[in-house]
Image: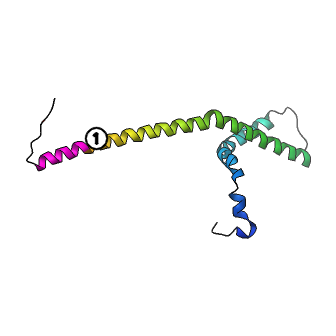
């Protein structure tokens, strides 16, 4: 924010460590929120009347249910798959780097042989 929020302590609020758990669940909450709202409203068998108190409790209930379901999905799916993906990617890069270094080693041997008169001995 280029220092624009310092008069209102905005940087301290936005950098607060309490936002970390919510930030880790935010994408799951984003995906689950419309489904929870649809299930909540479409499962009703009767019309409902509007009041401010009902609206506040309804919003609080939907946000709480969304948070808990995102936590459930995060624990069972998102975080384990993230670890598996990270390990697989590290294994892939390790193999690619080893292959690249082996190819470079073979190219260096061939270049040295050509530089010394082109004599290369093939070992079987």
Q: Quadrant of the N terminus?
A: bottom right
Residue at position x 56%, y 39% from top? 82
* Residue plotted at (68% across, 58% down): 15
Give residue 97's quadrant in the image.
top left
**Is residue 7 rendered magenta in the image?**
no
Task: Look at the image and give the residue range highlighted in magenta.
Answer: 105-117
Is residue 27 in view from this perspective? Answer: yes
Q: Position of residue 57 (x, y in %)?
A: 87, 44
Residue 40 location, quadrant: top right
Expressed as whole percent of the image width and height from the top left, the position of residue 109 reads 19, 44
SS for dot 1: helix
Left or right position of 121 against 11: left
The residue closer to the viewer here, 101 or 77, is 101
Residue nearest the observer in this picture, 62 or 107: 107
Q: Residue at x 72, y 42 (%)?
A: 33
Q: Residues within 10 Å of mark 1 (few under 14, many from 20)?
A: few
Q: Is residue 51 visible?
A: no
User: Left or right: 59 with respect to 123?
Assistant: right
Give the labeled residue for mark 1.
102
81 or 46, nearer to the observer: 81
Q: Which quarter of the figure is the C terminus placed in?
A: top left
Which percent across, then down, holds residue 62?
79, 41
- Residue 88: x percent and y percent? 47, 36
Colour mapping: rainbow
In the visual, does 3 lie left or right of 111?
Answer: right
The residue sitting at 72% across, 63% down in the picture is 10
Q: Magenta residues: mostly which secondary structure?
A: helix
Q: Count how many numbered circles sit on residues in the image.
A: 1
């Amino acid at each position: 924010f280029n220092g624009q929020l310092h008069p209102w302590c905005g940087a301290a609020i936005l950098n607060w460590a309490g936002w970390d758990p919510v930030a880790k669940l935010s994408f799951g909450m984003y995906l689950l929120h419309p489904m929870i709202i649809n299930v909540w409203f479409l499962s009703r068998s009767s019309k409902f009347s509007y009041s401010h108190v009902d609206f506040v409790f309804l919003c609080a209930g939907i946000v709480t249910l969304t948070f808990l379901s995102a936590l459930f999905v995060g624990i069972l799916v998102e975080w384990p798959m993230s670890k598996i993906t990270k390990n697989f990617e590290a294994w892939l890069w390790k193999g690619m780097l080893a292959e690249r270094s082996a190819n470079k080693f073979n190219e260096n041997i061939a270049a040295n042989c050509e530089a010394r008169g082109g004599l290369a001995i093939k070992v079987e």
